[in-house]
Amino acid sequence: MTSTLTDSAFLQACRGERPAHTPVWFMRQAGRSLPEYLKIREGTAMLDSCFRTDMVVEITMQPVRRHGVDAAIFFSDIVVPLKAIGVDLDIVPGTGPVVAEPVRSAAQLAQFRDVEPDDVRTITDAVTALVGELGSTPLIGFAGAPFTLASYLVEGGPSRDHRLTKQLMYSDPELWHALLGRMAVIAGQFLRMQVEAGASAIQLFDSWAGHLSLADYETYVKPHSTAVLESVADLGVPRIHFGVGTGELLHAMGDAGADVVGVDWRVPLDDAVTRIGPGRAVQGNLDPTTLFAPTEFVHARAAEVIEAGRAAEGHVFNLGHGVLPATDPDALTRLVDFVHAYQPSDA
Ligand code: CP3
């Protein structure tokens, strides 16, 4: 890593330092809020675009050019490593990942083989190209956490209540742990390949973990998320761990081995810092729907987020979940400018 990259505001904040300005990026910054994204995606299916080096590079760069965010997140999806090893699934527009044969039996686990470098060559090529193009702007690699991946595999698609997932978890713990164990290996391998190709941080998305009680999270999920984060510990890049509705799980998610805990908008960051405990930075947490309010309101709320974030050893500004597709991209650019210019009261 070059010194300017190492000293970037984003990596400083991830390490628990206080950079000159609060770094900001947005989950789902690459995507349907951008007209240039809609244009380049015309005629190419979502999953096909994730395996095209040129499209991954261009779509990843779009929000960096337009908004001047402090980090890029590589354009892909949590189900891409599963697609890469041949799992029969698709991403249906307006719905999300849909799996042809939902996982119900131990015999089905054989399809979840290790990810080999050749399976994702077009993707790691994109990461390498991006790192060159980004210069001192860090690239975040990512993977889906075992629980969130398993939820799609067991339900067969998105679920409101995760009923079938929990049914498997409670009724066949042996199969459950075998499935999550495989997801942990696959997620870990995919993250390692991204970092080895040049990504300078990783984020583990456990988007649906907030549907679990703390006790169930500890018993059925945390050991596997810990295994993923542990498997990339030797790479020395910051590890961000994020989920939605995880107010009761924040400490456990940090304890799983995160350097940075992503917080959704329900818990103020100073409260989140108390829950998480010392030694970890935080990322978040403006409600993504705030961006539909008048600019003065957005900026007042953003100031509150930054002030609350001062309780943390390091704070990366983000939304509490992904950018909604209907968001006005100019509101995002204005927010980046505001976060960069804002001087916290204790600075
Ligand atoms: O953040 C970024 O800019 C990087 C790209 C990214 C995508 N998916 C692109 C995408 C990332 C980090 C993801 C992660 C992802 N995918 C998660 C975890 C993050 C979160 O939002 O909680 C989850 C749960 C998924 C599964 C998934 N894939 C969903 C729910 C959807 C949306 C379905 C829809 O059409 O509303 C997708 C598709 C998807 N992934 C799109 C994008 C840009 C939309 C595809 C399109 O343009 O049609």
Image: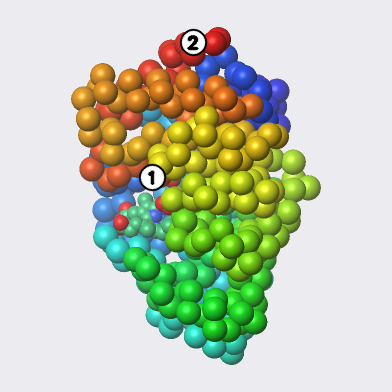
- Quadrant containing the N terminus is top right
Q: Which mark is residue 345?
A: 2
Q: Amino acid at mark 1?
A: Gly
Relative to 213, does residue 98 appear above or below in the rendering? below
Q: In which quadrant of the rendered view does residue 6 lie?
A: top right
User: What residue is drawn where x is 23% and y is 43%?
Assistant: 326
139 with respect to 331 (left or right): right
- Quadrant containing the C terminus is top right
> x, y (%) of residue 38?
27, 47
Question: Quick check: is the Cβ at mark 1 less than 8 Å away from ligand 1?
Answer: yes
160 with respect to 133 (left or right): left
Q: Nearer the viewer, mark 1 or mark 2?
A: 2
User: What residue is drawn where x is 64% and y is 75%?
Assistant: 177
Badge 2 element? loop
Q: Mark 2: few, some, or many residues within 10 Å (few <14, many ≥20)?
A: few
Residues at marks 1 and 2, CA–CA distance in whole angstroms? 28 Å
Which quarter is ligand 1 in? bottom left
Residue 52 visible (yes or no): no
> x, y (%) of residue 180?
61, 70
Q: Which mark is residue 322?
A: 1
User: What residue is drawn where x is 34% and y is 45%?
Assistant: 31
Pick whichever of labels 1 and 2 is earlier in the sequence: 1
> x, y (%) of residue 96?
35, 63
User: What residue is drawn where x is 70% and y is 34%?
Assistant: 279
Give 167 or 295, whichever is nearer the viewer. 167
Badge 1 element? loop
Relative to 274, does residue 310 appear above or below in the rendering? above
Q: Amino acid at mark 2?
A: Ser
Q: In which quadrant of the rendered view does residue 280 lie?
A: top right
Q: Residue furthest right?
A: 234
Residue 171 visible (yes or no): yes
